Image: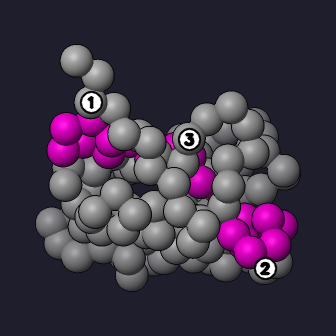
Amino acid sequence: MNNKAIIATEAAPAAIGPYSQAVKVGNTVWISGQIPLDPETMTVVEGDISAQAEQVFKNLSAIAEAAGGSLNHSVKINISLTDLGDFDAVNTVMKSFFAEPYPARACVQVAALPKGVAIEVEAILAV
């Protein structure tokens, strides 16, 4: 039996490739990597890494809500940055979107991300 549900919301950017915003199986939700796209214009937000991170976490939050949860249902967050020098700024933004206890997390530096952005974040939730 396939109990896979596709999660989609207009409150977050539409997929820019052959993937879903999120997939829910049972009480687990896998949210695809989000970059700092404005869901209304589908353009990258202007500003520094804090502005980009803010938009990424807003996008993740909208998808989490569409799946019946919130970012506080996150059990694992994966962050990709093009510059680990942005780590502290991203931590500050992330902290404003989560309540303790925080989810598990990984953060890596990558060579490049879609549309030349500085950050991409994906999440796994238990709702």
Badge 1 or badge 2: first in the primary sequence:
1
The residue that label 1 is drawn on is 3
- Residue 20's disc is 3
Mark 3 secondary-structure assignment: loop
Front position in the image: 36 or 96: 36
Q: Are marks 3 and 2 in contact (CB under 8 Å)?
A: no
Q: Position of residue 87 (x, y in %)?
A: 54, 61
Q: Secondary structure at mark 2?
A: loop
Mark 1 Cα within 10 Å, few/some/many (few <14, many 20+)? few
Q: Is residue 37 magenta?
A: yes
* Region rendered in magenta: 24-45
Question: Which numbered disc, 3 or 2, marks the residue that appears first in the sequence?
Answer: 3
**Which label is found at residue 47?**
2
Image quadrant containing the N terminus = top left
Q: Is residue 119 left or right of residue 62?
A: right
Q: Quadrant of the C terminus?
A: bottom left
